[in-house]
Image (cartoon, helix red, strand yellow):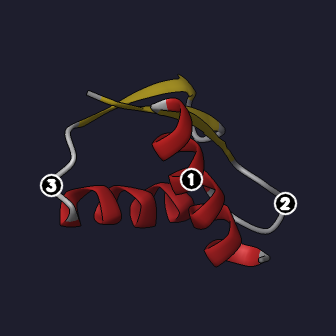
Amino acid sequence: MQGILGAVGKALITLQEAGEVIIEKTDELYLDEITYYVEETLKGVKAAYKIEEIEPKVKLKITLQ
């Protein structure tokens, strides 16, 4: 998988397995693009989560509660 689908899929799998994921901006994708779709998925399944900004506009961490 490549692009936004691959980034979102990897983030969701990591969240499921580890309970947290660090999302970083890439050359092709912006942080807010990836975060939006991961967050919408978590809202859709009514999962409790917390977002922590590590580096503004570059890196953040999503943790399942």
| Horizontal side, residue 6 vs residue 47: left or right | right
Please report contact status of discs 2 and 1: CB closer than 8 Å, yes or no.
no
- Secondary element under disc 3, as helix, strand or loop, is loop
Which x, y percent locates residue 45? Answer: 21, 61
Return the residue nearer the eye: 40 or 53: 40
In the displayed structure, 59 sits above or below 39; it is above
- Check disc 1 and give the amino acid type: Ile
Q: Quadrant of residue 65?
A: top left
- Secondary element under disc 2, as helix, strand or loop, is loop
- Residue at position x 80%, y 68% from top? 28
Return the residue nearer the eye: 20 or 31: 20
- Residue at position x 20%, y 39% from top? 48
Residue 27 disc label: 2
Return the residue nearer the eye: 28 or 8: 8
- Residue at position x 66%, y 39% from top? 58
Which badge, 2 or 3, comes first in the chain's sequence? 2
Residue 46 disc label: 3
